[in-house]
Image: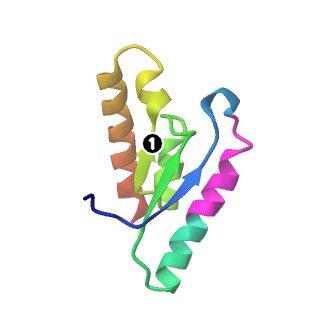
């Protein structure tokens, strides 16, 4: 039996259709989910699946996303370990900028 962790997932955009015009919609949804959680004293984590990359991770994290699904950003090119490390570093730096 698994443990259920409540969460809200925002589907962003498929990598092959990724463009800057679609990210603001996802960012708006993330901010709204964070706002609703605070207003109603709910407990859930916000996840985004799609559109996560070095060029978008800071904005996504600053908006309030806590779980990032970044398959293509990590495995889409050579050196997945290095890609993951760079992405985690950028996400960590963005977390510090939220405060």
Image point 42% across, 23% down: which residue?
Answer: 75
Q: Name which residue lies at 47% across and 55% down.
A: 47
Q: In the rendered image, which quarter contains the C terminus?
A: bottom left
Q: Residue 55, how many percent across, how many down? A: 54, 35
**In the image shown, does 27 or 1 lie closer to the viewer?**
1
Magenta stretch: residue 25 in it?
A: yes
Instruction: Spot the residue most to the bottom.
Output: 40
Label 1 belongs to which residue? 69
Question: Where in the figure is residue 67, as x and y percent of width and height?
Answer: 40, 52
The furthest residue to the top? 78
The residue drawn where x is 61% and y is 56% is 27
Estimate the x, y position of residue 39 in percent, counting from the top left: 52, 85
Question: Under tag 1, what secondary structure?
Answer: strand
Q: Main secondary structure of the magenta part?
A: helix
Count up the numbered dots.
Answer: 1
Q: Which residues are magenta?
A: 19-30
Q: Residue at x 40, y 57 (%)?
A: 66
Q: Residue furthest left?
A: 1
Colouring rule applied to residues: rainbow
């Amino acid at each position: 039996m698994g443990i259920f962790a409540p969460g809200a997932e925002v589907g962003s955009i498929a990598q092959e259709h990724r463009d800057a015009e679609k990210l603001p919609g996802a960012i708006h949804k993330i901010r709204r989910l964070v706002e609703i959680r605070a207003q109603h004293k709910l407990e859930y984590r916000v996840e985004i699946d799609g559109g996560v990359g070095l060029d978008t991770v800071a904005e996504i994290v600053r908006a309030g996303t806590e779980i990032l699904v970044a398959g293509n950003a990590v495995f889409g090119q050579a050196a997945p370990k290095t890609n993951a490390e760079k992405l985690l570093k950028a996400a960590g730096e963005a977390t510090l900028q939220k405060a």
